[in-house]
Image (cartoon, rainbow, N blue to C red):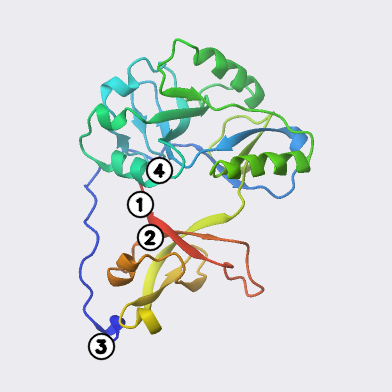
Amino acid sequence: MRSFTSAILPAIFSALPLVVIAHPISVQLAMNYQNQDVLHYLVSEKYDGIRAYWDGKQLWTRHGNRIKAPKSFTKGFPNQPLDGELWIDFGHFSDMEGLIQQQTSTDKQWQNVHYMVFDLPADKSPFAIRYQHLQKVLTAKSPRHIQLVRQFSVENTQALLNQLDKVVAHHGEGLVLHRKNALYMSGRSGHLLKLKPYKDDEAVVIGYRDGHGKYQGLVGALKVRMADGTTFAIGSGLSDELRVHPPKLGSMITFRYNGMTSHDIPRFARFVRMYHRL
């Protein structure tokens, strides 16, 4: 039998609909928490959804693609910019991702979607003050599906880790720490941090390893390359379907890992999902 890598690979995943990218949205992006003093930060739960920027009239992804939500969903949204996540429920990231990729969608499809709002991008105040202003913007009269993400303080690192345990227990993704005196700024900085029980990243598929044993004739692992040039293989997390019909060469995946090895390779790397630049 020919090895998988010597066979002609079929086209597996349908091409996404073409979209016109108007302009990237200048949103804040989080760095990893590295034992910074928690007293300088407000903490919130991190929701595993689709980052969405409301410009006062419509929703956009952070890469500048318009999100074609039904008018019924955005009816009653404030006329000022908001930053948040479109989120359905724990474990439903793929459902949310698939929904916003559709050229048309119905009110019913969006009935379980929530816009979890955590910032006011146009407000020039420090974050602690912006949060107070946001509480006044999002009132009891706001649409039920637009929700304010609660911010709270912790006394020390152990209290922070205790909160992380609670979030993980109900299948949450992790925590976000936002420096109290930070102004809203685009890009990554120490003003916005994320804390998870694991780390995740993206990589491009550059090849395949043949499977052995029960995976004979199938894909045993994906050869991938990270943005910094690090190359390695990921076999864990691949479904039987993906071993038969793997991601195309050049496609992007999201993987999860627990720190780095002594050779600077992601430890215990496992496939999570396909990554689509939305």
**Sequence-wise, which precedes: disc 3 or disc 2?**
3
Q: Quadrant of residue 67?
A: top left
Residue carrying label 3: 2
Verify CB contact (< 8 Å) between mark 3 and mark 2: no
Above-or-below relation of 4 to 239: below
Viewport quadrant of the N terminus: bottom left
Label 1 vs label 3: CA separation? 31 Å
Residue carrying label 1: 276
Q: Quadrant of residue 40?
A: top right
Residue carrying label 4: 92
Amino acid type of the residue tagged 3 in the rendering = Arg
Residue carrying label 2: 252
**Sequence-wise, which precedes: disc 1 or disc 2?**
2
Verify CB contact (< 8 Å) between mark 4 and mark 1: no
Verify CB contact (< 8 Å) between mark 2 and mark 4: no
Label 3 vs label 2: CA separation? 26 Å
Q: Which of 25/198 is in front?
A: 198
**Sequence-wise, which precedes: disc 4 or disc 3?**
3
**Sequence-wise, which precedes: disc 1 or disc 3?**
3
Q: Would you call the spot at circle 3 few (<14 residues within 10 Å), some (14-19), or many (20 or more)? A: few
Label 2 vs label 4: CA separation? 20 Å
- Counting from the top left corner in percent of width and height, residue 215 is at 36, 79
Amino acid type of the residue tagged 2 in the rendering = Met
Q: Would you call the spot at circle 2 few (<14 residues within 10 Å), some (14-19), or many (20 or more)? A: many
**Sequence-wise, which precedes: disc 4 or disc 1?**
4
Q: Which of pointers 1 and 3 indicates the residue nearer the eye? A: 3
Q: Which of 190/198 is in front?
A: 198
Above-or-below relation of 224 to 145: below
